[in-house]
Image: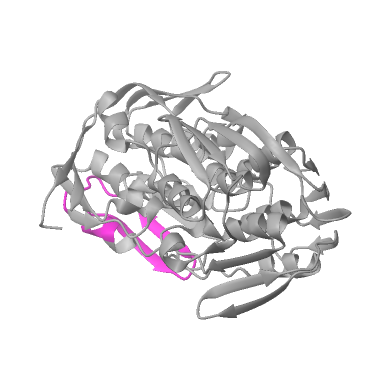
């Protein structure tokens, strides 16, 4: 078993390069199997979620070839079916995108209920509502979602909430439906725009992605294409927060600064100096931080996937901060781990009150999910002494070579094999 060992209180200096967006690639790889031809996907993050998706597709006859570490060729010419069993999808939440992709291509899908991080109720009712509106029938039996349609027909679909997953899944299926589909109250996150752009490269007709109304005119066939994934907004934010908590001068490169506006504003509120370039953000921090209040929202609000990392940062702010989680109903499971490092945090429902402390102290902790693991890394960078983080399989799901990237900018962090945790 592996864990991360961090000797804290080292300031960070230098450049860190951001990988392709996890939340985009886990939708774009399933979308690629809808194409009649080869898809070349570049700027692929080297993470466990990608490996799991590739293994799932390989099991049903899709040829997946890494020509370079960050480039994948997907050829579904010899795909053998539309089923994804539990053993294939249990590790990742985004496996549900196979439903929309299979349904679009085959008008049938059998996909096990998705796995991934457990931090609250995350139903797929809006996905199923959309599929049904397109003409599909579904049953759920023994944890398997079975979908079928004689044909898919465009429809007007109003989402009860702006669900990212439902927006993308409906977009996938509707791309190969007959007629026009309109998704209202659609989510607007950057990875939705990236998935729509990829589909359009394949020959789909998707308009309005990035707004709350998306219009899809169905086509009968999609072709192969080459596409480059956008930079990872959440990975970029994680390193920005790491620079803020450790102090120093770090330039985060290969980013889209506009995507980072909600975080950049909060870091400036706390006393960091932010410089934006065309594709970079420089963070200068003394480590002496003011408190602030944060409310997570759907895009373009403050992202829920940066909430745990931000909570770690607020632990050392000079005063009281209030963090409100408006997206997921149980995303504070990691709080007890931050408390083990000395964080003074009180949780009441969806609200966390963080009383800043002068000093975090190293301890043995365990990641409870992907972003919670990143929060523990951030806290460990500021803590006095040694922090040992277990369950780092969660961190590897979404961060490419996190210890190498942090080491290059001055952190004392190592990946170690041990039987202790």
In the rendered image, residue 360 lying in the magenta stretch gets the answer yes
Residue 50 versus residue 253 in the image, above or below: below
Q: Position of residue 239 (x, y in %)?
A: 39, 34
Q: Is residue 260 above or below residue 161?
A: above
Check the image and report above or below for 398 versus 242. Answer: below
Q: Residue furthest right?
A: 179
Coloration mode: one colour
> Horizontally, is 166 left or right of 274 in the view?
right
Tell me where residue 305 appears, x and y as whole percent.
48, 50
Identified at 28% across, 55% down, the residue is: 343
Q: Is residue 357 part of the magenta span, yes or no? A: yes
Residue drawn 68% across the image and 65% down it: 108
**Residue 36 image-quadrant placement:** top right
Q: Which residues are magenta?
A: 337-363
Number of residue marks: 0
Residue 147 in percent (x, y) is at 67, 70
**Residue 361: in sight, yes or no?**
no
Q: Residue 394 versus residue 180: which sits nearer the camera?
A: 180
Where residue 41 appears, as percent x and y from the top left, is 55, 33
Name the quadrant of the C terminus.
Answer: bottom left
Q: Is residue 273 visible?
A: yes
- Hey, which quadrant is residue 159 in on the image? bottom right
Horizontally, residue 148 falls left or right of residue 269, namely right
Q: Which residue is nearer to you in this view: 409 or 69? A: 69
**As drawn, which residue projects farthest toward the bottom?**
141
Q: Does 2 appear above or below 251?
A: below
In the picture, measured across the screen, residue 104 lies left or right of residue 146, that is right
At a point 77% along the width and 54% down the height, the residue shown is 174
Question: Depth check: 108 or 320 in front?
Answer: 108
């Amino acid at each position: 078993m592996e864990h991360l060992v961090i000797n804290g209180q080292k300031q960070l200096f230098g450049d860190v390069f951001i990988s392709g967006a996890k939340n985009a690639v886990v939708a774009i790889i399933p979308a690629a199997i809808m194409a009649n031809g080869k898809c070349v996907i570049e700027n692929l993050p080297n993470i466990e979620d990608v490996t799991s998706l590739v293994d799932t597709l390989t099991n049903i006859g899709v040829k997946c070839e890494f020509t370079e570490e960050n480039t994948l060729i997907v050829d579904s010419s010899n795909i053998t079916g539309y089923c994804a069993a539990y053993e294939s999808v249990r590790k990742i939440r985004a496996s549900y995108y196979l439903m929309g992709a299979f349904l679009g291509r085959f008008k049938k899908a059998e996909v096990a209920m998705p796995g991934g991080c457990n931090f609250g109720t995350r139903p797929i009712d809006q996905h199923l509502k959309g599929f049904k509106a397109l003409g599909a029938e579904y049953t759920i039996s023994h944890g398997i979602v079975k979908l079928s349609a004689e044909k898919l027909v465009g429809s007007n679909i109003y989402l009860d909430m702006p669900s990212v997953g439902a927006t993308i899944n409906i977009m996938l299926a509707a791309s190969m439906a007959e007629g026009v589909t309109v998704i209202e109250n659609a989510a607007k996150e950057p990875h939705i725009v990236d998935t729509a752009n990829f589909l359009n490269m394949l020959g789909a007709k998707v308009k309005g992605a990035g707004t709350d109304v998306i219009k899809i005119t169905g086509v009968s066939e999609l072709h192969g294409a080459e596409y480059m994934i956008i930079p990872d907004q959440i990975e970029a934010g994680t390193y920005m927060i790491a620079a803020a908590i450790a102090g120093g001068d770090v330039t985060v490169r290969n980013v889209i600064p506009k995507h980072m506006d909600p975080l950049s504003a909060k870091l400036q509120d706390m006393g960091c100096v932010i410089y934006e370039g065309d594709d970079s953000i420089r963070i200068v921090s003394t480590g002496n931080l003011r408190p602030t209040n944060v409310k997570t929202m759907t895009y373009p609000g403050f992202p829920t996937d940066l909430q745990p990392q931000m909570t770690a940062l607020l632990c050392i702010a000079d005063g009281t901060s209030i963090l409100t989680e408006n997206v997921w109903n149980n995303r504070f499971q990691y709080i007890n781990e931050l408390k083990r490092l000395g964080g003074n945090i009180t949780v009441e429902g969806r609200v966390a009150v963080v009383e800043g402390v002068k000093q975090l102290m190293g301890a043995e902790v365990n990641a409870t999910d992907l972003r919670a693991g990143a929060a523990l890394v951030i806290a460990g960078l500021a803590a006095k002494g040694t922090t040992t983080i277990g369950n780092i399989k969660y961190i590897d799901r979404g961060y490419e070579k996190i210890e190498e990237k942090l080491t290059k900018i001055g952190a004392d962090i190592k990946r170690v094999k041990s039987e202790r945790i």
